[in-house]
Amino acid sequence: MNTLIELNNITKTFDDQQVLKGINLKIYENEFLTLLGPSGCGKTTTLRIIAGFDEPDCGELLFGGIEISKLPPYKREVNTVFQKYALFPHLDVFENIAFGLNIKKTEKSVVKQKVERMLELVGLSGFEKRDVTSLSGGQQQRVAIARALINEPKVLLLDEPLGALDAKLRKEMQFELKKIQKEVGITFIYVTHDQEEALSMSDTVVVMNDGYIQQIGTPTDVYNEPENRFVASFIGESNIIEGVMIRDCLVSFDDFEFECVDKGFKDNEDVEVVLRPEDIDIVSPEGAKLTGTVESVVFKGVHYEIMVKSKYRSYMIHTTDFCEEGRRVGLSFGPEDIHVMWKMV
Amino acid sequence: MKRLAKISMGVYVALCFAFFYLPIFITMIFSFNSSKSLTKFTGFSFKWYQELIENQEIMSAVWVSVSIAILATAISTVLGTITAIGLTRHRKLVKEWILNVNNIPIMNPEIVTAIGLMLLFTAMKIDKGYVTMLLAHISFCTPYVITSVYPKVRGLDNNIANAAMDLGATPWQALRKVIIPMIKPGIYAGVLLAFTMSFDDFVISYFVSGNGVMNISMIVYNMTKRTNPTINALSTIVILVIFIAVAVVNIVPIIKRKKVTVHEKNN
């Protein structure tokens, strides 16, 4: 895959507050990349820098190998879908979608043909003359996507586009967006704070916090192999335990030594260990290394969330098997369920 | 009981309208009087209208009023709109401060503004006349434009200009094709306010003008010192112009709405 956009050591400060503290990122052609993080982590600022609405203080922004950080937004080959859509209420659906082509003085018949194709792509055929303010949130969203895609950008930027939709519509649109991305075959850069959204749609997830990139990887990578405590706790539920890496493939915590699959740490280095709640099994206390008492059981729909109090901490476990409160149980997990991370300083 | 209520309501409304419009009607009627009397209608004639047209002084005052109102409205609308758009980009504190400062000239008694402007022009040794009157009108019209345009700009999505530029519009195109059409109602309100404020201004114009430059209000004030039905003729024309303007402002949106519904039906 070819690199399309490259961010090198980008920093940005607003009102004495450093929002981006050195972002390095490569974005490839035809990739669905998600910038994921809590509000204020710098994900939207990163997007706005790529779009050209904000200029970085330092660093390089390369587009196809050419520095563009000083280029105004109207000269860039990217288009944006905004959080609150930012449609033009004085124009109807057709005129909204045709806006970019009309600016470029495209021939009328070509415009008409392209708008129709876009409306078909987003499933709004026949809505040409409708007033955009009369549309539902989901329909406005589709108009916004069509308005951006009609310009045939190399990259589509999406700033929390599903934030204002209800849960069911969100799911539908997630699926649809992924479909559209495959159909038009361009790079999507998607900003969200919703980890589930990020995991289910992306080819690459970029986890951000506090102006830094915490981890870049496939959804399975960031979920199964979180690089630090922040990534582990932000994406999914997790038990995070302080431990010591005795040597490659052997880690010690809570008075016991466990085999694991992680390598590359120094011998006896302080580390943090992630155990996902669904990776822990409840077994009988005999012969189990870790034991404890069931503290609470909460029914969550598909699974039970069970808290087991052991000697040093409470473990969260997700299981479909019921287990009554107060019972003594053992906890079991395999070497591949243990994820060892660098300790955050 | 119900009937009585209806009747008394009708009488009340009629009295109100009579109170508003009777003076205007009297002015209009006596503008067609054949004699100079303001009490007895002696016969119908266009005499005073003819005199009005032949009166150089009055005609030049009309020209001054109209041209100043048009120029002051145009300039203050541009200034006020740009200011309102720029204001939304400022921090909250700066914004509130400027808006409060903007309200002072609106609430200030006109006479204070008038004397202030007069002293300023005198201190700067600017010859009083047409230009000073125009400058004064621009200065008291602009705050009204800002006040009526600002809420419309504030109501825009923060990203609306970015969205236009994202789609390939230059900042100028974004302003022309997106921002201005969206804040149009506010701009129209500003234009109407500015024009009426400028057209019927007397106090400020009286203090800042000189060298014989007079607008309609000033010349009427001068003429009321002696009986002169030409004023009635002039007033009638002004009333007619205002009446037509109000009618157009009210009727055009109705026609437009009808057109849109017909258009929708055809689709």
Image (tube, rainbow, N blue to C red):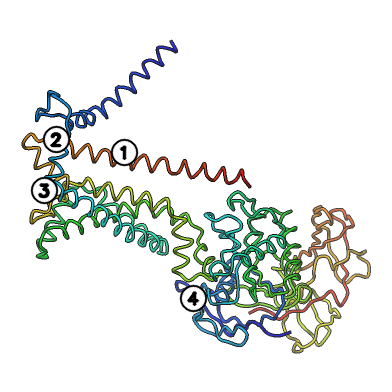
Q: Position of residue A180 (x, y in %)?
A: 73, 66
Res A42 → quadrant: bottom right
Q: Position of residue A250 (x, y in %)?
A: 83, 83
Tell which tag, 3 or 2, sits nearer the viewer: 2
Instruction: Label 4: state its secondary structure.
Output: strand
Q: Are marks 3 and 2 in contact (CB under 8 Å)?
A: no
Query: On the same chain: label 2 and label 4?
Result: no
Question: How many neighbours does mark 4 have within 10 angstroms: few (below 14), some (14-19), or many (20 or more)?
Answer: few
Instruction: Label 3: state its secondary structure.
Output: helix
Q: Are marks 4 and 3 in contact (CB under 8 Å)?
A: no
- Residue that label 1 marks: B243
Subunit of mark 4? A
On the rendered image, what quadrant is the N terminus of chain B found in? top left
Measured Cα–Cα span from mark 4 to mark 1:
57 Å
Question: How many neighbours does mark 3 have within 10 angstroms: few (below 14), some (14-19), or many (20 or more)?
Answer: some
Instruction: Label 1: state its secondary structure.
Output: helix
Front-lying residue, B96 or A41: B96
Question: How many neighbours does mark 2 have within 10 angstroms: few (below 14), some (14-19), or many (20 or more)?
Answer: some
